[in-house]
Image (cartoon, rainbow, N blue to C red):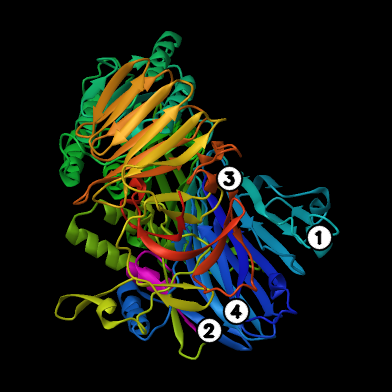
Amino acid sequence: MERTLLALMVVSSLVGLATAIDPKHAIEILSLHVDCKVTSRFAHTVITSKIVNRANESSEATFEVELPKTAFISNFSMSIDGEVYPGIIKEKASAQKQYDTAVSHGQSAGLVKITGRKLEQFHVSVSVAAASKVTFELTYEELLKRQLGKYELLIKVRPKQLVKHFQIDVRLFEPQGISFLETDSTFLTNDLTQALTKVQNETKARILFKPTVEQQKINPELDETLLNGDFLVRYDVRRGATAGDIQIVNGYFVHYFAPREMPVFPKNVVFVIDQSGSMAGRKIEQTRDALLKILQDLRAGDHFGFITFHRKVAEWKSSLLEATAENVASAAAFVQTLIASGGTNINSALLTAASVLDRAETLPARSVSMIILLTDGQPTSGETNVEVIQENIRKAISGKYALFCLGFGFDVSYKFLEKMALSNGGIARRIYENADAALQLQGFYQEVATPILTKIEMQYPENAIEGLTKNNFKLFFEGSEIIVSGKISNELEVLPVEIKAQSHTSDLTLIEEANVKEKERVFQNQSYIFGNFIERLWAYLTIQQLLEKSISAQEQQQKTLEAQALELSLRYGFVTPLTSMLVTKPSDQQQTELANKPTEADNEKPSSFPVGDAYRLRTGSLPSRWRFLSQSGSNKKLLPAVFRLAGQTRSQPLADEYPQLLLQLPGQSEIICLNTDGQAQSSVHLLSDPEQGISVTGNLGDKTNHFVQFEITYVNPPVQIHVSTDAVVVRHSRKTTRLPWTESATSTVQGLSISVEKERSLTVSLPDTVTVKISFVKLPDDFLGLYFLDTNHFSDNVSGVLGQLYSKAQFENKPSVNQRDDERLLSVSGTEHRVTRQYKKDYRLESASDPVSCWSLDITS
């Protein structure tokens, strides 16, 4: 489901507060309001937060809002002691130039960052003088997308403290009529339910959530808030058996089309499944689980087939099979046998899929053919040039089939998959590596499982409509919606619409006429509707489609499309991938923050930096040799050389070395870079967990102060795995298997999966236990990097130099301790360590050696 997502949080970083002030309440939220107006699916949301500094000295407050990736920010401002500091939206290059000028004078930068599957986080920090008040206001706009028969508005709220005046006010107006409406929340108690009111008639609804301070409390005796979770509004609209609904305001129209109760086309689906070495362990298990469920959802009359690939491509059957009970059972048995090993030959796999559909002979005359690709990596075998692959697939498919590309995890090149899907009538989607990955795969399949129309053409009078958005569509799936918008010429009194499409049983022609003046009267005198919403909806939709079209366009056309999208972004004041917002803040030297719109392709790797921390680029106090990398003439690139935390700065050199060990604390964004004082050739006891039945030791090298050997021992099954920079050696029942790094391979011993990806990594996984990952890092002196996944499986008895951090590490909060802002106190097994924020190279595969910000800890082995 497409969701409108929003998380609100105001936190404080305090500097020099008097001891009489409780730091927890120094920055107090006086009010926090979320006002959302949804008019004909177009959501206009305003978040307003008023805060006061109760401390005796200045404090820094950070305003954070999580909003949908599909939304465009359209306004932001801060009001401090009566003076307003607005955000200014500019073309990205112009904004960057102005920002670079500010940076060269030591000013700071804030970014909009991707924080989740459908979330990005806007945050801005400001210094608040003692007893001063600040009002933050952020506005964003989004066209809600109907999926699986409903629209969903999700407001994720985390104020972190009790708020005297808190409210969420959602107002809906749907001229078609509201067919159903429901609210839900993950944090509603009986008391909080009393704070929720809902008023609804045929076309309007208002949901107001306004809890008192007492209702917000977890416990009457404690000042802790219950408001930590999701607040949801779900609804759909009434639909007749017509050519859809047309709405008109101020000369702009929007046409919604979502036919119902139509027969479903039979599908011919080829599933193309990556089983390369990087899919080993949890990924291939989740893929198997999803495919088993999807097989059960195939309909009578559907045809299907499987193509699996690593270095080589294999067809399960030589032709597509009908989804009979017998064939589905046979397919389920095949799916259970899927294992992972080898490289990634995407080109040959997709060409084979197209060939299977080309030569299919017994398929229904009126049916829909599609290819669904699932991969977690980039092409490493066969043809590896992504542009050549894209062109090969475009020619092979030639508009006959739809290609859907699912990218599993963060090692994929999303741009590559997205361009390939959009060029072939499909879409790309990232599948996130979480416990519910199988459900994500099933959910995607459900979206495309019920095609009910093909070759849809939405026709309007050419000489009377300007700026028409996309009006031809390859497929329409049940539960979704087609939206077309444009500008009507002044002379037109009646807007005629003709829809042509093919259904499973016949060719359709639907005709509708809309009286312009009558349609405009529908929206008159609606006090809570912003009057030009259809014009802004048209601009939003046009920008989205221009950007999408540019992805698969040739270079010259791409520039033209982006220029059109940029002009609209600036005209309507949207922060899009082509624009940025500059926010000037008060200080001794005026500071400028830069808010950019990230895209899914920017999310190739997990964020190297904890979400809650503020990072800043400064050069004013750096040594001159650190300030710029001079490439040619005046072409200078700023080095990200300084980390800023809690209002202070400290020079940090760029990451120039790898840590010995790297781990992420369970349930936290904090990362530890660990160094031991072990000696070469001496075994270091890194980790053992008797309940998990696993232990790990390591040896440092002679030439490098990094690990070059690891010994992983399992109790059940009794297996020893010796890992060196030469090979992986597996010992079990007096049998020894050698897996060299020079080729990808997978071995399974009584459920224990051991997978080597050529010159990249080792993955060792066992159901319901932690997964061991070892990266093979090639430097002048090769070394091995160890880390763990699924660390929630560790027991409280895990021990060792590394293991103790998973159960016995805790950051201490001691404001009275004299420490720098880039220092923290970390308690490990009762012993306190002063740790320092540093940049290190990240040897984990998903981060591709990007710098990682971590707390550096030296510990005795």
Is residue 534 in sight in this rendering?
Answer: no
Whichever of callouts 1 and 2 sits on the residue coming sooner in the sequence is 2
Q: Position of residue 370 (x, y in %)?
A: 33, 31
- Which numbered mark, 1 or 4, is in the foreground of this view? 4
Q: Name the residue type under label 3.
A: Ser
- Which numbered mark, 1 or 3, is in the foreground of this view? 3
Dot label at residue 222: 1
With respect to residue 749, does 822 lie above or below? below
Which residue is under mark 2? Answer: 85
Which residue is under mark 3? Answer: 807
Give me the residue at 63% from left, 47% from top.
234
Q: CA distance from mark 1 to mark 2?
A: 36 Å
Element marked by disc 1 = loop
- Which numbered mark, 2 or 4, is in the foreground of this view? 4
- 838 or 297, nearer to the observer: 838
Which residue is under mark 4? Answer: 15
Label 1 crowd bin: few (<14), some (14–19), many (20+), radius 10 Å: few
Q: What residue occupies the far bottom of the structure in this picture?
A: 588
